[in-house]
Image (cartoon, rainbow, N blue to C red):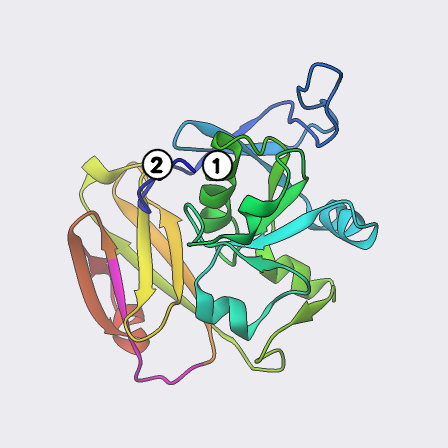
């Protein structure tokens, strides 16, 4: 698959005719839906509403790929989803065993920053019938749709990290990573260099996290990172 940097360009949203999963006789995707799209690294990714996605799920018309870190996937995921992290999956990624005409749905918590990166990578690799859940995993949970994992009953707290960086990074992604675990989130950087990261977390409060873009990173506990503006 085409390898791309984690800090990919992204975040621009537009309206457009989005390809569905059923191809015509020429092998091109059918124009089933008019979903909103987000552009990631030059690739348009359709953002599918969670209610439509569940209909595909319930009728076995799609396969699901979790674009987050391994620890997040193990704790809580859409039932039956595979681990295929942003941006380009993992070694021996299960998605690589799927036919390129498979309808694939990616998701994350951001609600669709990591999932759109993974979807863009898949689309570029020939999986043209790929969507990201517009409302993310949180929207799926709110509807009471099937989930599984080791921490399904955990009380996940929502943390918001606001920060700023150089305007030269506008339209790139700022990353959040846990230092001692495979847990990550991402958010787009606005034209003025500002960004807002969200994390749903139920682990120890003394765990440390890194926030960064390119080669510029800062580290702290969630209490430290949420107490003031994080400047990179």
For the residues labelled 2 and 1, the Cα–Cα distance comes to 11 Å
Within 10 Å of disc 2 (Cα), the crowding (few <14, some 14-19, many 20+) is: many
Query: From what the image shows, is residue 155 above or below residue 94?
Result: below
Foreground mark, 2 or 1, reads: 1
Which of the numbered marks, if any, corresponds to residue 120? 1
Image location of residue 45, percent across then percent down: 54, 34
Query: What residue lies at 52% left-to-right and 76% top-to-bottom?
Result: 156
Q: Secondary structure at mark 2?
A: loop
Whether tag 2 and tag 1 are in contact, CB under 8 A, the answer is no
Farthest residue, direction top? 26
Give the magenta range.
203-211
Query: What residue lies at 45% left-to-right and 66% top-to-bottom?
Result: 70
Image location of residue 54, percent across then percent down: 75, 52
Q: Quadrant of the N terminus?
A: top left
Which of the numbered marks, if any, corresponds to residue 90? none
Q: Is residue 20 visible?
A: yes
Query: What residue lies at 60% left-to-right and 38% top-to-bottom?
Result: 130
Image location of residue 63, percent across then percent down: 67, 49
Image location of residue 64, percent across then percent down: 64, 52
Q: Secondary structure at mark 1?
A: helix
Of residues 214 and 167, which is closer to you in this image?
A: 214
Of the numbered discs 2 and 1, the one sitting upstream in the chain is 2
Give the left or right position of residue 109, taking residue 27 as reference: left
Query: From what the image shows, is residue 59 above or below residue 100?
Result: below
Within 10 Å of disc 1 (Cα), the crowding (few <14, some 14-19, many 20+) is: many
Give the left or right position of residue 122, taking residue 33 as reference: left
Q: Is residue 13 visible?
A: no
Which of the numbered marks, if any, corresponds to residue 9? 2
Query: From what the image shows, is residue 173 above or below residue 109?
Result: above
């Amino acid at each position: 698959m085409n390898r791309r940097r984690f800090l990919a360009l992204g975040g621009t949203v537009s309206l457009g005719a989005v390809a569905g999963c059923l191809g015509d006789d020429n092998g091109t995707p059918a124009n089933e839906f008019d979903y909103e799209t987000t552009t990631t690294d030059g690739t348009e990714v359709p953002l599918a509403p969670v209610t439509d996605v569940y209909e595909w799920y319930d009728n076995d018309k799609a396969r699901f790929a979790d674009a987050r870190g391994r620890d997040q996937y193990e704790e809580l995921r859409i039932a039956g989803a595979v681990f295929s992290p942003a941006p380009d999956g993992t070694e021996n990624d299960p998605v690589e065993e799927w036919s390129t005409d498979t309808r694939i749905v990616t998701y994350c918590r951001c609600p669709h920053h990591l999932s759109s990166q993974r979807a863009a990578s898949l689309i570029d690799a020939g999986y043209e019938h790929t969507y990201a859940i517009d409302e993310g995993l949180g929207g799926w949970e709110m509807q009471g749709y099937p989930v599984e994992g080791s921490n399904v009953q955990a009380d996940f707290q929502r943390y918001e990290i606001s920060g700023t960086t150089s305007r030269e990074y506008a339209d790139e992604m700022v990353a959040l990573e846990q230092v001692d675990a495979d847990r990550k989130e991402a958010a787009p950087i606005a034209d003025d260099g500002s960004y807002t990261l969200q994390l749903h977390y139920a682990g120890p409060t003394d765990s440390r996290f890194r926030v960064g873009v390119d080669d510029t990173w800062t580290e702290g506990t969630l209490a430290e990172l949420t107490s003031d503006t994080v400047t990179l």
